[in-house]
Image (cartoon, helix red, strand yellow):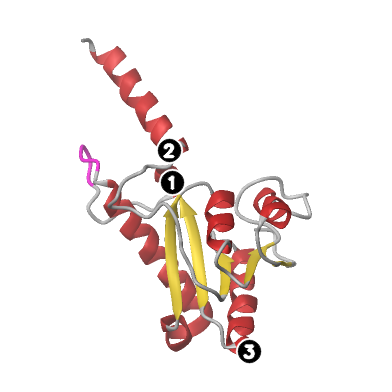
Amino acid sequence: MTEQPRDTVVAAELDEAAVEPVEDADISTRAEVEGGVVVGHDGSGCAQEALEWAAALAERAHWPLHVVRAWRIATAPQPPTWEPGYVPPITDYEKAVLADLESDVAAVLGAERAARASCHVVHAQPVRALIEAAAGADVLVVGARGRGGFAGLLLGSVSDQVTHHAPCPVTVVRSDRKG
């Protein structure tokens, strides 16, 4: 086998892995919650404001707070084990995503309030991850806009989809932020 076809095959497999969720027992492909507030968080400014709002609601209602971040290899931060010529296991990427999420939650809520929140990182498409988590929630909270998409839209694609398909009430937190 020559290098060119092998590289093409590897690139195709990586692209497929980035699109399709991995069904691996070592990583989480679903956030299962039992009541409370689920808030989607992609690291954007709007997600930070949605997290603030969701945390305040959870505290007032005495409900647990669940922060969910969907991810794929293409969106994951580089794990500390990464080095040139070495591709770390997918579990290392999951750990890096979780560390990033926990840092974002602590930055918004402070260490004490963040310690009471449950952080979930899910290797799945954002809409699927949030709708599945919402199946056990009392309310789902999302920001109006996330990191992707078109800046001129009033509502992002994820927030639009979850308002139509979530199995629980949904609150969309509007913001003056653009992303």
Which residues make up the magenta segment?
83-87
Question: Residue type at mark 3?
Answer: Arg
Cβ atoms under marks 2 and 1 closer than 8 Å: yes
| Residue at image mark 2 | 18
| Residue at image mark 3 | 60
**Whether residue 93 is situated above or below residue 171 in the rendered picture:** above
Residue under the point 31% across and 59% down = 95
Pointer 2 or 1: first along the chain: 2
Residue under the point 28% across and 52% down = 26
In depth, the one of 167 and 58 nearer the eye is: 167
| Residue at image mark 1 | 72
Dominant SS type (magenta): loop
Q: Nearer the viewer, mark 3 or mark 1?
A: 3
Residue 77 location (% of width, % of height) = 39, 53
Question: Residue type at mark 2?
Answer: Ala
Asked if residue 29 shows in the view, the reply is yes
Label 3: which secondary element: helix
In depth, the one of 141 and 179 nearer the eye is: 141
Label 1 neighbour load within 10 Å: few <14, some 14-19, many 20+:
many
